[in-house]
């Protein structure tokens, strides 16, 4: 079973799929508080960055598919 969510980038976890970005699973997530979230995917070494927008904007939101 899969849960489809639209959540802030700092809630991304390994094993998630971000369908708007890649059909590959997220293999690693590093959160740099008040700076960015860096996610790597299983099919590439190239990371994807999600910037922190500050106290007025927070983290960008992303679509997440997560197994329950």
Image: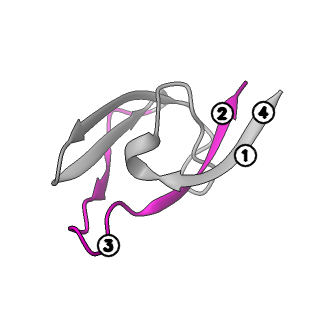
Could you tell me which residue is drawn at 25 percent across and 68 percent down? 53
Q: Secondary structure at mark 4?
A: strand
Count of numbered circles on the image: 4
- Which of the two discs, 3 and 1, labels the residue nearer the N terminus? 1
In this view, the residue farthest toward the bottom is: 56
Residue placed most toward the observer, 46 or 13? 13
Lower sequence index among marks 3 and 4? 4
> Which residue is labeled 3 in the image?
57
Q: Nearer the viewer, mark 3 or mark 4?
A: 3
Residue matched to label 2: 66
Along the polypeptide, which appears first: circle 4 or circle 2? Answer: 4
Label of residue 2 in the image = 4
Q: Which residues are magenta?
A: 44-68
Q: Residue at x 57, y 33 (%)?
A: 16
Q: Pinpoint residue 41: horizontal percent, then vertical percent.
A: 44, 34
Looking at the picture, does residue 56 appear above or below residue 44? below
Q: Badges 1 and 4: C-beta atoms under 8 Å apart?
A: yes
Query: Label 2 neighbourhood size at 10 Å, few (<14), some (14-19), many (20+)?
Result: some
**Residues at discs 2 and 3 in contact (Cβ within 8 Å):** no
Where does label 1 land, which residue?
A: 4
The picture quadrant where one finds residue 57 is bottom left
Which callout, 2 or 3, points at the residue further toward the start of the chain? 3
């Amino acid at each position: 079973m899969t849960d489809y969510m639209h959540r802030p980038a700092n809630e991304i976890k390994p094993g998630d799929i971000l369908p708007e970005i890649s059909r590959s699973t997220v293999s690693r997530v590093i959160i740099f508080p008040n700076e960015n979230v860096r996610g790597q995917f299983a099919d590439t070494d190239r990371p994807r960055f999600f910037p922190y927008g500050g106290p007025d904007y927070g983290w960008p939101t992303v679509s997440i598919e997560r197994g329950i």
